[in-house]
Amino acid sequence: MASTHLVFVCLFVSLVYSKSIQNDTERSTDERIDNLENVVKSWTTTIQRLNASYNKAPLMEEPVMFYALTERTFTLEKLSTVIYEKTIINTGGHYNTFDGVFVAPKSGTYFFSWTSCTNGANYAFTELMVENQLIAKAGVYEHAGSYHCGSMSSLCKMSKEDHAWIRTTPYGAKNYFYFHRRTPSSSFLGMFMSNE
């Protein structure tokens, strides 16, 4: 009988001991799960903060700029729009190669520059127009029969949807624009500089 009691005592001790190990394991597992949940909460908070700061940061806007030139020789009457038919850069597509007009996508200050080239005792007098307002003039007169170019640059304020273009001046009936592949071309460029 003593051996039976000993077996029961050993069995009881092993059950108590295994229950104790199980409780420790459960406690350990619960603690580990709690720790993991805390880490996930911390990461979630960090991600939410990053998203909030990213959404508040100003997004980089696409620049507004164009550069176009002519690849032909032509003559224009006075008060005629000069059409620069070949675009090198036209970010945003705001310069129209068919009518020679730039349309401002937003209000602000814009920079424009243009060059007119002529030769053979001819002239090319031009002006920058914004919504039928004269902004600046440029001209070139070649009286010796060789090749010359005249340029001008200007800053001006434009409202959204305003139009800008280069036209010939009211002076002179035959503005001659010369082109040759080995010489500079008549050109027109513009870019957005800053908000109002």
Image (cartoon, rainbow, N blue to C red):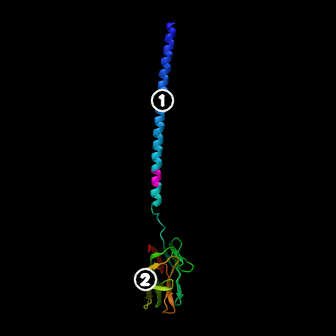
> Nearest the camera: 51 or 60?
51
Q: Residues within 10 Å of mark 2 (few under 14, many from 20)?
A: some
Which secondary structure is most common in the magenta stretch? helix
Quarter the C terminus occupies: bottom left
Q: Is residue 168 above or below residue 98?
A: below
> Nearest the camera: 132 or 184?
132
Q: Position of residue 48 (x, y in %)?
A: 47, 52
Q: Position of residue 72 (x, y in %)?
A: 53, 81
Mark 2: which amino acid? Ser
**Upstream in the sequence, badge 1 or badge 2?**
1
Mark 1: which amino acid? Thr
Q: Is 49 part of what is drawn in magenta?
A: yes
Q: Position of residue 147 (x, y in %)?
A: 44, 85
Q: Secondary structure at mark 2?
A: strand
Q: Position of residue 104 (x, y in %)?
A: 51, 76
Determine the residue positioned at 48% across, 29% down.
25
Mark closer to the observer (1, 2): 1
Residue 25 numbered mark, or none: 1
Q: Is residue 30 above or below residue 73?
A: above
Determine the residue positioned at 45% across, 79% down.
157
> Nearest the camera: 174 or 54?
54
Q: Residues within 10 Å of mark 1 (few under 14, many from 20)?
A: few
Residues under numbered marks 1 and 2 in contact, where contact means CB atoms less than 8 Å apart:
no
Query: Where does the magenta region start and end?
Result: 46-50
Determine the residue positioned at 44% across, 87% down.
139
Q: Secondary structure at mark 1?
A: helix
The residue tagged 2 is 151
